[in-house]
Image: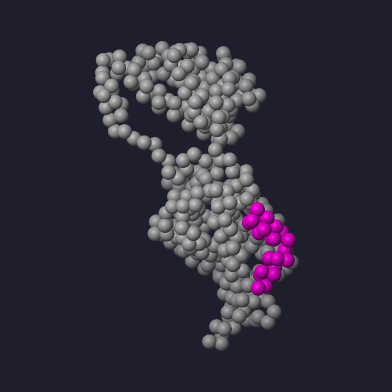
């Protein structure tokens, strides 16, 4: 009983010592406070207007028929696109694109209307300014919505010309009526799409870089990151690992609650999840991140190496969350590689909770993965600390 009491007292001393180290290192404080507290605000300010409307485009109508003119009118009436220029040639449209006056071009070939009248497949071409994904998205959405409506209209005209009644036409065209419904992101907002994944990524990356900076600094100064403090002597790296981890866990549970709960409320992001469900997810995620950062920070011997890792790893980790590309479509190597990072499981879980309104029972598999990952990194952290302690 006396040993356990001393063990917990030592772990508490390590926790207090680590908090002092964090507060005395200006670089770590900048990362934790500016990045941890400021990045969520900065990202939301940048992407706050997540819906781009009335993207200016040019139209080159070489067909000049009723079909092409009707298509152009419908495109101009969409929320996504605004027909700002009508050009007589592609050269004129290309000049407008180079001058950045339009973000896309729709080209109707001369045979467009004739092909429709003669029952052949008609084609048109679109050209998007790829300097921004949103320009491409708007051009594709706007033209595709109009294309689907035009296909329906053309069928109605052909069936009507064939002598069919309105009821017969309706049964042929809409035998099974459907309604387009996009429940979790009705406006196709990029901020909802991107920030739901980015918020939890900030927690993982900020903790990792801050802890790695301190480990690198200790080694540059000829010290071990498992150095026993004050009155502490003898074996027992567990108190070092858990004591240090407790300092980051306490700090990032506060930062995590701010990022996952307060920031979305400030910027009006969807919050369909139960508050306590999100807190439970944070308990698992932050614990996992503590041991993840402890394990990997043991590899850093220089302080500046962390900044190189920051630039190299962050975009990859962001992509591996699956927010922009389905995980099922990942090559096998990248799917396995994604299992290294806690965000690969936590970000989908957070999106399901906060955006889709799921409960803990529906993300239990993801939480189980976080738990297994925590056990693996906890073991690695203890082994790394033990080896480091032997070398000290």
State whether residue 237 appears in this view: no
State whether residue 207 appears in this view: yes
Residue 63 rendering spot, x and y as whole percentages: 48, 13
**Number of dots carrying numbers:** 0
Residue 93 rendering spot, x and y as whole percentages: 59, 19
Q: Is residue 25 magenta?
A: yes
Residue positioned 39% across, 36% down in the render = 180
Residue positioned 26% across, 19% down in the render = 165
For this rendering, which residue is in front, 66 or 207? Answer: 66
> In which image quadrant can residue 135 be found?
top right
For residue 92, above or below residue 374: above
The magenta region covers 16-38
Can you say which quadrant of the picture contains the C terminus? bottom right
Q: Is residue 134 magenta?
A: no
Residue 167 rendering spot, x and y as whole percentages: 26, 24
Q: Residue furthest bottom?
A: 2
Residue 343 rendering spot, x and y as whole percentages: 52, 55
Of helix, strand and loop, which mostly describes the magenta segment? helix
For residue 255, above or below residue 266: below
Color encoding of the figure:
one colour
For residue 349, above or below residue 330: below
Residue positioned 38% across, 23% down in the render = 151
Residue positioned 55% across, 26% down in the render = 82
């Amino acid at each position: 009983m006396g040993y356990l009491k001393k063990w917990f007292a030592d772990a508490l001393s390590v926790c207090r010592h680590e908090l002092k180290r964090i507060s005395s290192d200006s670089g770590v404080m900048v990362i934790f406070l500016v990045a941890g507290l400021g990045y969520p605000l900065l990202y939301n300010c940048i992407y706050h207007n997540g819906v781009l409307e009335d993207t200016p485009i040019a139209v080159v109508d070489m067909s000049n028929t009723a079909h092409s003119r009707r298509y152009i009118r419908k495109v101009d009436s969409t929320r996504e696109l605004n027909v700002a220029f009508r050009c007589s040639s592609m050269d004129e449209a290309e000049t407008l694109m180079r001058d950045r006056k339009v973000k896309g071009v729709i080209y109707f070939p001369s045979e467009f209307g004739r092909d429709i009248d003669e029952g052949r497949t008609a084609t048109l071409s679109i050209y998007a300014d790829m300097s921004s994904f949103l320009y491409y998205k708007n051009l594709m959405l706007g033209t595709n919505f109009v294309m689907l409506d035009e296909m329906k209209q053309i069928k109605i005209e052909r069936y009507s010309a064939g002598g069919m009644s309105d009821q017969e036409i309706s049964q042929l065209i809409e035998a099974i009526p459907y309604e387009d419904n996009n429940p979790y992101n009705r406006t196709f907002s990029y901020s909802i799409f991107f920030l739901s994944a980015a918020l939890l990524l900030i927690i993982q990356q900020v903790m990792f870089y801050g802890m790695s900076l301190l480990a690198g600094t200790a080694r540059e100064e000829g010290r071990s990151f498992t150095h026993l403090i004050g009155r502490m002597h003898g074996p027992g790296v567990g108190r070092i690992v858990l004591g240090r981890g407790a300092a980051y866990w306490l700090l990032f549970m506060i930062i995590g609650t701010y990022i996952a709960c307060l920031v979305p409320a400030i910027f009006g992001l969807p919050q369909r999840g139960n508050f306590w469900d999100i807190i439970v997810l944070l308990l698992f995620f932050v614990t996992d991140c503590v041991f993840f950062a402890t394990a990997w920070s043991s590899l850093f011997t220089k302080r500046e190496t962390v900044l190189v890792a920051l630039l190299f790893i962050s975009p990859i980790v962001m992509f591996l969350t699956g927010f922009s590309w389905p995980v099922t479509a990942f090559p096998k190597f990248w799917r396995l590689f994604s299992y290294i990072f806690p965000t690969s499981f936590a970000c989908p879980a957070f999106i399901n909770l906060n955006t889709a309104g799921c409960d803990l029972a529906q993300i239990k598999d993801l939480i189980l993965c976080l738990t297994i990952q925590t056990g693996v990194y906890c073991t690695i952290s203890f082994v790394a600390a033990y080896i480091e302690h032997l070398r000290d």
